[in-house]
């Protein structure tokens, strides 16, 4: 699953269309399809953090996906003193202007360039050198990292204003146009993140869900079951059906013992 | 190969930083105040980073030289290690670095002189001539040598330290700098090996056994002291034939009577490292083997260990003298 956070509907619109997302009634302006969930957070780092937290909670209650494998992308427009209007960058060093706190998102394999990104609480009179300027990234990254591995929490910004095209000229129409012009880059970023998140996906397999429906597992037993099924996958391949002797297990404890025995026997033959 | 380089602000103009960056003209450079904010930050995923590791250039302020853990060494009582680099170009699935570090980025400390000063000081604390210094504890000693040039300078340091011994431990074949200079008597280039089956399944990105054997042979011909390291031994039902085959392969090219030392040790990991590695690679066969937990360590258990160790010891004895064989505990 991929969580997309952006500040305004104008920025969201081209992505909503490209991914064919459907609007869902919610406290935030929320759009989704099976894999992608987009929240229009509103402007500012607190809004971005709140949207991130809200979506993570929602994912944990309404999907079978493990929240740690959710990838996150904050996209939108940003200012930069020198960069060309319409150029796009991942953020590789994100600084919160108010607190001075810094994050270094790992650069994921992507053809897009990356640069420094400064999150400000309100627009600055003059740009700081060599940085993108936005109002959401620091809140987003701090919140996103509470739920997912740091590599899966990324920002992608399109330059909307610079020293020659001031912020005062930026409006919803321009924001929408710039995002639309960069839709390929944004979709490429999304795909890269989705591939990465598959590596860490620890969502329960279908067989695990079925087993837990038939027998009651305590929290610690469920952890043991998960690990034993992983070992089964490593040594014998994915468990497809519940085999006969295990079908007869009178309790979750007996089920676990029998399954562990099967796996241990396979392991001892290594 | 390196797409991203983090550099500490303090060393932006350091000559080694400049020359390392010159090797990667297309890399994106990012400045940071201290390397720790990149390398040690929370919620990093080693496995994800290993897909595209960055290089971090930093300065190390203290603890350049540390005593080795007990049981690590080749016969001396005074054993130290130093790590000019943390993490490795290769990706051995059994490697404890995955469990120890949060980040898979390559961290290189560029203030080599401080390492050499501390080595000299440590060596001068004893009049004995068998103070050993081990390189390759937190990285592979030679894999990044073309980039760092550290070992070449370390050898310069040891060439004037007659009472200190250096072990350069490696799985790499980056031996050009060694071949381009005269050997020094107080340095052993020690190559790590696992049997073919283990190497193929667990040592990702590592040069083949044949290439390592060739490298060892060339170093021997040049007059360098060489060693063999069979650590970690991964238990298998075919251990005897696996190691017989491996040693036959090695000694078909390498001269046994010119082997300085051969050491071996079992696969063992501290529990927290093991747990982290399982979380990173839940589908890895090695971590699904019947391992046991004892005294905060995860291992194959006493019985499998003693059988394996005695098999490897006996196999080594077919080629080298008892006095150059050292078990690592
Ligand atoms: S070569 Fe050594 S340091 Fe490098 S990954 Fe393998 S075991 Fe670890």
Image (tube, coloured by chain):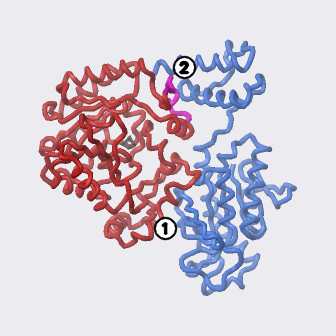
Chain colours: A blue, B red
Q: Secondary structure at mark 2?
A: helix
- The C terminus of chain B: image quadrant: top left
Q: Are marks 2 and 1 on the same chain?
A: no
Which residue sits furthest right? Answer: A25
| Closer to the camera in the image, B98 or B5 | B98
Residue indicated by mark 1: B33
| Residue in the picture at 21% in, 45% down | B165
Q: Quadrant of residue B224?
A: top left
Residue A199 at x, y = what percent?
58, 44
Read off the magenta span: B281-294
Residue B300 location in percent, x, y?
45, 24
Q: The N terminus of chain B lies in which quarter of the figure?
A: bottom left
Q: Nearer the viewer, mark 2 or mark 1?
A: 1
Q: Is A28 located above or below residue A77 in the figure?
A: above
The answer to if B231 sits in the magenta stretch is: no
Neighbour class for label 2 at 10 Å: few (<14), some, many (≥20)? some
Q: Would you say the beta carbon of the disc 2 residue lies within 8 angstroms of ligand 1?
A: no
**Secondary structure beneath label 1:** loop
For the point 52% across and 60% down, which residue is it? B37
Residue B210 visible in rendering: no
Marks 2 and 1, how far apart in space?
A: 49 Å
Q: Which residue is mark 2?
A: A264
The residue sitting at 55% across, 81% down in the picture is A82
Task: From the viewer's perspective, tell me whether residue A163 is left or right of residue A38.
Answer: left
**Image position, residue B91 (x, y; %):** 42, 43
Chain under disc 1: B
């Amino acid at each position: 699953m991929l969580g997309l956070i952006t500040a305004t509907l104008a920025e969201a619109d081209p992505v909503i269309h490209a991914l064919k997302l459907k609007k869902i009634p919610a406290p935030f302006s929320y759009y989704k399809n099976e894999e992608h969930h987009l929240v229009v957070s509103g402007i500012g780092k607190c809004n971005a953090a709140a949207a991130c937290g809200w979506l993570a909670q929602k994912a944990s209650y309404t999907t079978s996906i493990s929240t740690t494998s959710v990838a996150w992308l904050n996209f939108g427009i940003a200012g930069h003193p020198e960069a060309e209007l319409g150029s796009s960058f991942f953020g590789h060093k994100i600084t919160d202007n108010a607190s001075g706190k810094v994050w270094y998102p790992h650069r994921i394999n992507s053809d897009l360039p990356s640069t420094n990104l400064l999150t400000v609480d309100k627009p600055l009179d003059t740009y700081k050198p060599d940085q993108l300027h936005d109002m959401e990234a620091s809140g987003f990254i701090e919140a996103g990292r509470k739920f997912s591995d740091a590599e899966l929490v990324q920002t992608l910004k399109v330059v909307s204003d610079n020293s020659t095209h001031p912020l005062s000229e930026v409006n919803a129409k321009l924001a929408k146009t710039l995002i639309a012009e960069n839709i390929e880059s944004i979709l490429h970023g999304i795909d890269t993140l989705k591939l990465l998140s598959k590596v860490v996906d620890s969502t329960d397999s279908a067989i695990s869900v079925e087993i837990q429906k038939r027998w009651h597992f305590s929290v610690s037993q469920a952890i043991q079951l998960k690990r034993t099924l992983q070992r089964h996958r490593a040594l014998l391949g994915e468990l497809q059906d519940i085999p006969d002797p295990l079908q007869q297990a009178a309790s979750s404890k007996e089920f676990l013992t029998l399954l562990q025995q099967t796996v241990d026997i396979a392991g001892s033959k290594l | 190969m390196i797409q991203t380089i983090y550099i500490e602000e303090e060393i932006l103009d350091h000559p080694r930083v400049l020359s390392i960056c010159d090797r990667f003209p297309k890399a994106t450079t990012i400045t940071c105040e201290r390397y720790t904010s990149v390398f040690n930050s929370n919620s990093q995923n080693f496995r994800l980073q290993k897909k595209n590791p960055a290089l971090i250039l930093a300065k190390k302020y203290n603890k350049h030289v540390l005593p080795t853990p007990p049981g690590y060494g080749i016969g001396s009582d005074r054993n130290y290690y130093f790590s000019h680099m943390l993490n490795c170009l290769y990706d051995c699935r059994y490697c404890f670095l995955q469990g120890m570090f949060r980040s898979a980025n390559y961290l290189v400390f560029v203030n080599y002189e401080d390492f050499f000063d501390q080595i000299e000081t440590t060596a001068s604390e004893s009049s004995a001539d068998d103070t050993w210094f081990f390189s390759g504890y937190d990285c592979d000693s030679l894999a990044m040598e073309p980039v760092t040039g550290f070992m070449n300078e370390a050898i310069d340091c040891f060439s004037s330290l007659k009472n200190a011994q250096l072990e350069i431990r490696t799985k790499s074949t980056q031996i050009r700098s060694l071949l381009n200079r005269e050997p020094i008597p107080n340095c052993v280039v020690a190559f790590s090996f696992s049997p073919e089956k283990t190497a193929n399944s667990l040592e990702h990105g590592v040069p083949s056994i044949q290439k390592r054997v060739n490298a060892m042979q060339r170093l021997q011909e040049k007059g360098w002291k060489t060693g063999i390291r069979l650590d970690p031994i991964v238990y298998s039902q075919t251990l005897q034939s696996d190691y017989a085959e491996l040693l036959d392969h090695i000694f078909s090219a390498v001269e046994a009577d010119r082997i300085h030392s051969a050491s071996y040790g079992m696969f063992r990991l501290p529990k927290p490292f093991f747990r982290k590695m399982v979380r990173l690679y839940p589908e890895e066969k090695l971590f699904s083997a019947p391992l046991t937990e004892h005294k905060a360590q995860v291992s194959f258990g006493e019985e499998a260990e003693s059988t394996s160790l005695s098999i490897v010891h006996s196999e080594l004895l077919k080629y080298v003298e008892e006095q150059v064989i050292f078990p690592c505990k």
